[in-house]
Structure formats: C-alpha cells, structure tokens
Image (cartoon, rainbow, N blue to C red):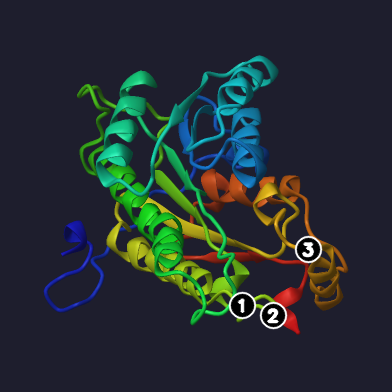
Amino acid sequence: MSDGAINSEGNFNRGNAIPGPKADKVMPLFSLKGKTAIVTGAGAGIGLGVAQALAEAGANVAIWYNSNKKAHERAGEIEKDYGVKCKAYQVNTTKYEDVQNTTDKIVEDFEGRLDIFIANSGIPWTQGPALDGEIAHYHDVVNIDLDGTFYCARAAGKHFRRQGLEGTDLNGRKLDESYTCGSFVATASISGHIVNIPQLQAAYNAAKAGVIQLCKSLAIEWVKFARVNCVSPGYIATEISNFIPQEMRIIWKNKIPAGREAHANELKGVFLFLASDASSYMTGADLVVDGGYTLV
C-alpha cells in the first residue's frame, strides 16, 4: 500500500518523510541548478513564464506544446538567456502513450533524471450553459484539463518512484546529492473552488476541482518519494482568455478585490517555490493566487 508508506493498520509508517534540505540559508533552497524540469503548455502564457522561472533558477527545461510551434523559438531564447539546456517537444497530452513516451525520451535526453514536472496544459470551456454546449467540447475540456494531468502525473511518477526508492537515474547510476525528491505541480484554478459568474462553465469547474483532488490524493500515494501540489490562479491576462468580450472582463475586475487581472509573470514565484526545496515540507497543498477573489 502506497509503496510501504501505510501499514496494515491504516496508519502512516514512521520514517516516511523525505529528508529536509541541509542548507541553513534560504536563498540556496530556491536553486534548481543541475535539475531537470518538464513544463507542459509552455509555448506561451503561464507555462512559458514558469519555464523561464525554472531556467533562471538553474534548471534544464523541456517545454511541451500542442500546436504553438513558436515554442521552439522560446526554447532557444531560454537557452540563450539563462545558460541552461532547453528543448521543445510537441505532445498530445490527451494520449497517455504520447505523454509517457515523451517523458521517457526527455529523461533520456536530459542526463537520465527528472526532478520537476509542471502539468500546466489546459483549455477553457467556451460554450456557455452545460445544457447548450456540445458533448464533444465537454470531452475536450475534461480530456485536456483533467485526464491529461493524470497522464502527466503517471508518467512522471514512475521516474520519481524509481529515483526516490532506488536512488538511481534511468541508466542505473546513483543520483548525486543535488537530487532530493520529485516535485509534481499542476495548474488548477479558482474555478475548482467556486462557481464563476457571469460566464457559465460547469465542465471546466468540475475538471479543475478534479485536478485539486487528484493532487491531494497523489500526495498521499507518493509521500515516500515525491511531493505533489497545485496552484489555483484567478483571472490571468493570457491568450487563453482572449475570446472573452471586454464587457465581461470588466465584470470580473469588479469582483476582484485587487481590481485587476494578474500577469502571467506574477505566478512565477509560486511555481518556483513549489518546484524547489524551499517547499520541502509542503505536499498536498493548493495555493490560491487570485487577488482576493475567493475571499468575498
């Protein structure tokens, strides 16, 4: 059960905890030097910002995209700007075999190890009330936003488990001291906590609520070898919401205590925190970054 974390009486075994970092100072905890990270949905928006943040902290980064071929340009820019390895991979996250095969290929390409996986790919619901939307659109939203996150977790978790329990990389070599544990971070949403208005998006809300519960559940299952957390952004000014008319965006802003949408760059810090050893005792958490929206 849970790779030995839970005993036959249903209690957690002592000694489960992944050892905490040895550094006494705080800034070294944010360093990702020598680590390998994968970020999905990283051709633009939140994913690109997160990839940049991880690279700035020293990680070698694989960025995934579905159709935005500019991701290859962005990968080149990240390499040049931050002096790390960065490559772009086209992946259909709704197909488990594609997710697993690409994850394995990246681990092979990036020195046989995986430290961080940011599952960020997602699409919005755009067809109004649930009774009026197309079933095909429902499947697209759930397949990408929830199923795809599960597929990413499963693919990454296989490497995290081997690394954490056996202490070896893909090639059977002993991992060095820079490896502490796996960190899986998913992009959820405040829509997993509340019902958005005036737009109606039941399928999206349900999918994001599923992402939050998935991460909490995996945090228990993986407690011996990886940390699992998620971030629930509020309204962010990215390409994903370009279809929203200005009149509706004004309604949003009137409901946000901070009075504005966030910029994608304002999420860099929270993702870096969860990816790094600065959050070594945090697992199963959902960090809400919403300008106070869910407070009122």
- Looking at the image, the residue that sits furthest to the left is 8
Mark with earlier residue (3, 2): 2
**Residue 243 sits above or below residue 117 on the image:** below
Q: Quadrant of residue 147?
A: bottom left
**Residue 296 sits above or below residue 14 on the image:** below
Which amino acid, mark 2? Ile
Q: Quadrant of residue 196?
A: bottom right
Name the residue: 62% across, 21% down. 73
**Residue 274 sits above or below residue 284 on the image:** above
Q: Which residue is mark 2?
A: 197
- Look at the numbered discs 2 and 1 and tell me whether their residues touch, using CB distance below 8 Å: yes
Name the mark on residue 245: 3
Q: Decide which of 273, 190 is in the foreground and name it.
A: 190
Marks 3/1: CA distance?
14 Å
Residue 11: image x %, image y %?
23, 75
Residue 160 visible in rendering: no
Assess disc 1: are there few (<14), some (14-19) or many (≥20) residues with their C-alpha within 10 Å of its C-alpha. Answer: some
Name the mark on residue 52: none
Which amino acid, mark 3? Pro
Residue 204: image x %, image y %?
52, 69
Residue 280: image x %, image y %?
49, 51
Marks 3/2: CA distance?
14 Å
Assess disc 2: are there few (<14), some (14-19) or many (≥20) residues with their C-alpha within 10 Å of its C-alpha. Answer: few
Q: Is residue 269 left or right of residue 172?
A: right
Q: Which residue is mark 1?
A: 200
Q: Is residue 207 left or right of residue 107?
A: right
Label 2, secondary structure: give it.
loop
Name the residue: 76% across, 73% down. 292
Which amino acid, mark 1? Leu
Label 3, secondary structure: give it.
loop
Residue 145: image x %, image y %?
46, 58
